[in-house]
């Protein structure tokens, strides 16, 4: 059971609920308020995405481009740092964490990434600063003390190959931080994620902390142009993952595909095949807005209105997935509680 692997003894129910960037459907993502709200809503694990500052610190942002999630555009002293950069082969224009020191990043304020879909969350813009990884671990530990439940942390290493090209080694910085925080053991309440393969393979030889290989419907790992995520989801691909990781984190549509109308198709064999390969299955990302839900779970044609996320979650719970990522952890916890006898 996932709770055993993570040594989170208070997790008696599965699937485990991972708060995706905190309670990010209700508060600006990756903020203290989002993480603390998620813990109070019953989430078992909180998730920080990790990128790097110019001076080598692990900072918590969805991407290294921060124009979407901070007020950096309102700081005239940083106007000349706006640029276009290739990230995993895709040109991106904006401001990038690797061009700022930690002190400069701390001078910014977090904003809602999807303000048109989540105006209620956008009302909290400007209230929180950018966090570092160790600050998120502290939030989890404080949450453990406050609630009596062991709160885990699921950091995702974003774009290691890109940062390496900028002479920033996110793997070394991450391992050093885990050692400093005492989180390198197999019993650490930590689940390390990455879309790339090489970083996880190397980390498996450096730490005993549980590892998770992320996958999605299109494309493949940025560091393995010879490999697709579809290949990795086959029985042979899953066996290869098991050599270095104990978990896969897969996009929901890899399990319940959708047709051209966005209605779901019959479930794939991925959950069964992964379990046969001795891999735990974590599914991402469950969001309540109609635009993210399959056709049959939408409430109407308005993209920001909420549909039947509980019903959609229950279909995955029926398939015996081990954990889910959700922007709305209260709903994921509620769906789980609703299934108890």
Image: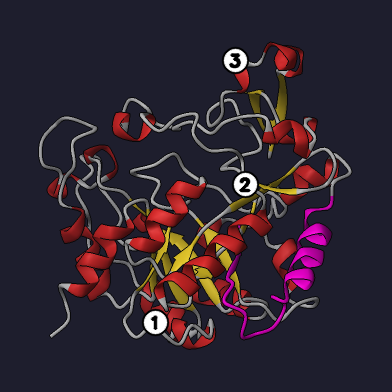
Q: Is label 2 in contact with label 3 (beta carbons under 8 Å)?
A: no
What residue is pinned by disc 3? 74
Q: CA distance from mark 3 to mark 1?
A: 43 Å
Residue 247 or residue 150, whichever sits in front: 150
Quadrant in which residue 20 is drawn: bottom left
Residue 189 vertical placement versus 266 (above, below) = below
What residue is pinned by disc 2? 131
Q: Quadrant of the N terminus?
A: bottom left
Question: Looking at the rendered structure, which numbered label has been put on residue 116?
Answer: none
Question: Looking at the rendered structure, which numbered label has been put on residue 11?
Answer: 1
Residue 63 image point, x, y percent: 60, 39
Quadrant in which residue 305 is drawn: top left
Decide if residue 284 is in sight here.
no
Residue 110 image point, x, y percent: 53, 34
Q: Is residue 83 left or right of residue 290?
A: right
Looking at the image, how many numbered discs can be counted on the residues? 3
- Count residues near mark 3 (Cα–Cα under 10 Å), then give few for <14, some for 14-19, many for 20+: few
Depth check, mark 2 against mark 1: the one in front is 2
Q: Is residue 194 left or right of residue 205?
A: left
Helix, strand or loop for disc 1 = loop
- Counting residues from the start of the chain, the first of labels 3 and 1 encountered is 1
Extent of the magenta region? 169-195
Residue 222 or residue 51, whichever sits in front: 51
- Count residues near mark 2 (Cα–Cα under 10 Å), then give few for <14, some for 14-19, many for 20+: many
* Residue found 62% across the figure and 46% down from its top: 131
- Counting residues from the start of the chain, the first of labels 2 and 1 encountered is 1
Helix, strand or loop for disc 3 = helix
- Counting residues from the start of the chain, the first of labels 2 and 3 encountered is 3
Residue 19 vertical placement versus 207 (above, below) = above
Q: Is residue 278 magenta?
A: no
């Amino acid at each position: 059971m996932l709770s055993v692997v993570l040594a989170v003894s208070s997790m008696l129910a599965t699937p485990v609920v991972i708060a995706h960037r905190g309670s990010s459907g209700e508060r600006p993502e990756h903020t203290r308020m989002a993480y603390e709200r998620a813990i109070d809503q019953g989430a078992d694990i909180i998730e920080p995405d990790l990128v790097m500052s110019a001076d080598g610190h692990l900072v918590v942002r969805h991407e290294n481009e921060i124009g979407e999630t901070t007020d950096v555009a309102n700081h005239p002293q940083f106007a000349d740092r706006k640029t276009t950069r290739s990230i995993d082969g895709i040109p991106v224009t904006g401001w990038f964490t690797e061009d700022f020191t930690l002190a400069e990043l701390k001078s910014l304020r977090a904003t809602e990434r999807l303000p048109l879909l989540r105006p209620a969350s956008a009302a909290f813009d400007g209230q929180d600063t950018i966090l570092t990884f160790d600050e998120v671990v502290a939030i989890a530990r404080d949450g453990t003390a406050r609630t009596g439940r062991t709160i885990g942390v699921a950091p995702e290493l974003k774009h290691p190959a890109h940062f390496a090209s900028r002479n920033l080694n996110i793997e070394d910085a991450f391992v050093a931080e885990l050692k400093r925080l005492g989180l390198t053991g197999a019993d650490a309440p930590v689940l390390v994620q990455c879309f790339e393969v090489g970083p996880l393979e190397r980390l498996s030889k450096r730490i005993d902390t549980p590892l998770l290989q992320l996958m999605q419907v299109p494309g493949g790992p940025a560091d393995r142009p010879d490999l697709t995520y579809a290949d990795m989801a086959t029985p042979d691909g899953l066996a290869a993952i098991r050599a270095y990781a104990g978990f896969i984190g897969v996009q929901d549509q890899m399990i319940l595909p959708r047709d051209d109308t966005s209605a779901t198709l019959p479930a794939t064999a991925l959950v069964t095949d992964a379990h046969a390969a001795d891999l735990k299955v974590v599914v991402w990302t469950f969001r309540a807005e109609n635009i993210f839900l399959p056709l049959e779970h939408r409430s109407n044609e308005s993209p920001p209105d909420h549909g039947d996320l509980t019903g959609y979650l229950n279909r995955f719970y029926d398939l015996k997935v081990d954990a889910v990522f959700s922007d709305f952890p209260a709903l994921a916890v509620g769906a789980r509680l609703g299934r108890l006898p």
